[in-house]
Image (cartoon, grey):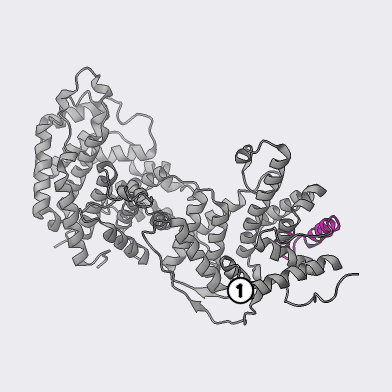
């Protein structure tokens, strides 16, 4: 991991460390999700992030996963399964098992890729899958078309756990999709497209370089990510605005750091712990 | 053979474009220059007709390089009407004072020259303007200067513009802006710099850009893929023409782009621009058939340029 990326991670750590108890409790799920991603590089700042986890978990009794973004919840749970107290672990396992049942029933179709990735055991294979990306050249909804391509790449590659190959033109077009998002300041889509690009090829290119530079340059002075100050001024109530600011900054930070990690070869979905290490029948006293 | 389209598609596209240009010839014709009373000649703006007319003239001039295009019956009719407009609109009236129209008149003069029509009085007027220590000395971007240098050189007017080498070094080609932030305007700068430095592939870009060549090629490819995603058919064509200028051995990207253009050509023969695409994306079906001259004439002329390059005479 190069020094720029390390500096970036270090600044995130300082930002998270500066959050108040109230803020931390209020946004515990996305915070834990972000920390899990930050910890992917086991050779950098592990102790510091572990201290943060301990600090945050001490401040909160019950974590509500249901109201949160499912992806964030699943990341947070993975962290809690190894670092939480008995009560934390029980709640996490309970949420996960209920979610699994609902998934088996066919619910959450719009999260299919994500849930399949978490709950289906994928055989490790060294086979390289060749995929072709059908591009609708005249689609009336460009963003929808881009989302479709990302879904395909994420599903086929199992979020980067499986090596997939595609033709040079498709790789270039995925980079272009990422660039379109950057020009519209759509950071989430930009980050997602760059990850998909990494899932189909890890070679460096002009647009890959400018894309990563774009993501890194979103980092603010305080270590958070995203420039939404002007938009957030629309919220007149100061406390409410503070809350919304933290909320969106965490969402954006998660997207960007995840991409930085994948770029450095740390695959997020490979890091999920194996299922069933903790049983829900062991209730806390 | 390094071609983007097959022969059948080339023919269909060419017929369509020439038909549309001919049908819409009146939109290209310029207003009578003698009608501008009560306004300072120096302040007269080019507006779209002079721009469109001049650009069509450039295509007519360029078509001399392709027998297939210049002998096409519809092309001949367009050319004749273009020449007729010069006289009908008193196109070169008051050249020495209408300085904002200078680039257009220089280009129109160059077009006439390429057709064997030499207007000595116009030449005199244009040279006089160039001799005033003004046109080639004003503060402009490297892009602007390079455009003007190119125009004056094809018109064979004496000038003191900096060398092509120097202008290249001062341009974005030597210092390419990040795609994350570059605007369409920057991309037009890119394409025009490449058109004119290479003189549409007559000059070897490798000799001009030296160690920057590969970077520039990668930048053009990246920009082309971006414009494909954005469905910006005008810029897609400018960049395809750039691929010719770079003497590139076409890749899948280029063939895919050219076919996208061929397929989006409308029944009336025009290639749609950004506004047309925006209207297509709207829910309002009544707007789908609408297209404005302003929006489509330029991509259509670019299509003609592209085909002239596709059908260029080989050295026989």
Split into 4 quadrants, where in the image is the N terminus of chain B?
bottom left
User: Dot 1 corresponds to which residue?
Assistant: A116
Local packing at callout 1 (Cα closer than 10 Å; few below 14, some 14-19, many 20+) is: some
Return the residue nearer the eye: B237 or B190: B237
**Residue A107 to residue B289: above or below:** below
The local secondary structure at tag 1 comes to helix
Would you say the magenta stretch is mainly helix, strand or loop?
helix
Residue A178 lies, in percent from the top left, at 50, 57
Judge whether residue B311 is colored magenta: no
Query: Residue under mark 1: which chain is it in?
Result: A
Q: Which residue is at the far top?
A: B38
Q: Which residue range is magenta in the image? A: A35-60
Judge whether residue A43 is colored magenta: yes
Residue shown at 30% from the left, 48% from the top: B286
Residue A252 lies, in percent from the top left, at 63, 53
Query: In this orientation, does residue B249 appear?
Result: no
Residue B158 lies, in percent from the top left, at 23, 34
Number of disc labels: 1
Q: Quadrant of residue A245?
A: top right
Compared across the picture, whether B192 is left or right of A277 comes to left
Split into 4 quadrants, where in the image is the C terminus of chain B?
bottom left
**Residue B34 to residue B186: above or below:** above
Compared across the picture, whether B245 is left or right of A269 comes to left
**Residue B234 to residue A237: above or below:** below
Residue shown at 85% from the left, 66% from the top: A87
Residue A213 lies, in percent from the top left, at 57, 52
Return the residue nearer the eye: A19 or A91: A91
Return the residue nearer the eye: B238 or A120: A120
Residue shown at 8% from the left, 53% from the top: B73
């Amino acid at each position: 991991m190069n020094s720029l990326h390390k500096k970036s991670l270090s600044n995130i750590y300082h930002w998270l460390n500066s959050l108040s108890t109230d803020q931390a409790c209020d946004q515990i799920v996305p915070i834990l999700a972000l920390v899990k991603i930050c910890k992917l590089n086991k050779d950098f700042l592990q102790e510091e992030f572990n201290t943060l986890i301990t600090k945050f978990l001490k401040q909160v009794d019950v974590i509500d996963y249901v109201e949160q973004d499912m992806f964030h919840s699943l990341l947070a749970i993975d962290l809690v399964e190894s670092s939480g107290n008995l009560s934390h672990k029980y709640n996490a396992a309970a949420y996960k098992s209920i979610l699994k049942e609902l998934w088996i029933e066919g619910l959450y179709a719009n999260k299919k890729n994500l849930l399949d990735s978490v709950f289906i055991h994928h055989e490790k294979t060294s086979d390289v899958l060749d995929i072709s990306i059908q591009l609708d050249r005249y689609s009336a909804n460009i963003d929808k078309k881009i989302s479709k391509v990302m879904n395909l790449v994420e599903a086929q590659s199992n979020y980067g756990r499986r090596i997939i190959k595609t033709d040079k033109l498709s790789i270039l077009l995925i980079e272009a999709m990422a660039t379109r998002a950057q020009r519209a300041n759509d950071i989430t889509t930009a980050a997602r497209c760059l990850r998909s690009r990494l899932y189909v090829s890890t070679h460096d290119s002009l647009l890959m370089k400018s894309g990563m530079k774009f993501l890194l340059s979103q980092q603010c002075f305080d270590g958070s990510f995203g420039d939404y100050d002007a938009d957030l001024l629309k919220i007149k109530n100061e406390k409410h605005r503070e809350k919304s600011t933290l909320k969106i900054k965490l969402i954006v930070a998660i997207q960007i750091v995840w991409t930085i990690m994948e770029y450095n070869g740390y695959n997020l979905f490979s890091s999920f712990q194996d299922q069933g290490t903790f049983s829900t029948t062991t209730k806390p006293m | 053979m390094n071609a983007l389209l097959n022969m059948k598609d080339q023919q269909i596209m060419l017929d369509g474009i020439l038909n549309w240009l001919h049908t819409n010839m009146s939109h290209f014709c310029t207003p009578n220059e003698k009608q501008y009373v009560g306004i300072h000649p120096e302040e007269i703006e080019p507006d779209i007709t002079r721009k469109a007319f001049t650009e069509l003239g450039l295509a007519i001039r360029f078509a001399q390089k392709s027998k297939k295009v210049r002998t096409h019956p519809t092309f001949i009719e367009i050319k004749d009407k273009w020449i007729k407009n010069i006289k009908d609109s008193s196109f070169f009236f008051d050249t020495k004072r209408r300085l904002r129209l200078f680039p257009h008149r220089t280009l129109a003069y160059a077009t006439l020259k390429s057709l064997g029509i030499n207007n000595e009085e116009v030449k005199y007027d244009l040279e006089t303007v160039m001799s005033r220590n003004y046109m080639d000395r004003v503060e402009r971007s490297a892009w602007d200067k390079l455009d003007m240098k190119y125009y004056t050189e094809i018109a064979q007017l004496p000038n003191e513009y900096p060398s092509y080498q120097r202008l290249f070094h001062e341009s974005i080609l030597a210092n390419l802006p990040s795609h994350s932030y570059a605007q369409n305007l920057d991309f037009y700068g890119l394409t025009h710099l490449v058109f004119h430095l290479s003189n549409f592939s007559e000059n070897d870009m490798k000799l001009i850009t030296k160690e920057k060549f590969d970077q520039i090629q990668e930048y053009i490819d990246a920009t082309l893929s971006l414009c494909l995603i954005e469905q910006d058919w005008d810029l897609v064509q400018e960049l395809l023409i750039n691929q010719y200028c770079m003497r590139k051995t076409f890749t899948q990207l280029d063939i895919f782009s050219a076919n996208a253009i061929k397929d989006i050509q409308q029944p009336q023969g025009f290639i749609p621009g950004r506004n047309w695409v925006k209207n297509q994306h709207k829910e309002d079906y009544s707007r789908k058939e609408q297209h404005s001259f302003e929006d489509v004439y330029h991509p259509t002329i670019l299509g003609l340029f592209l085909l002239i390059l596709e059908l260029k005479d080989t050295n026989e």
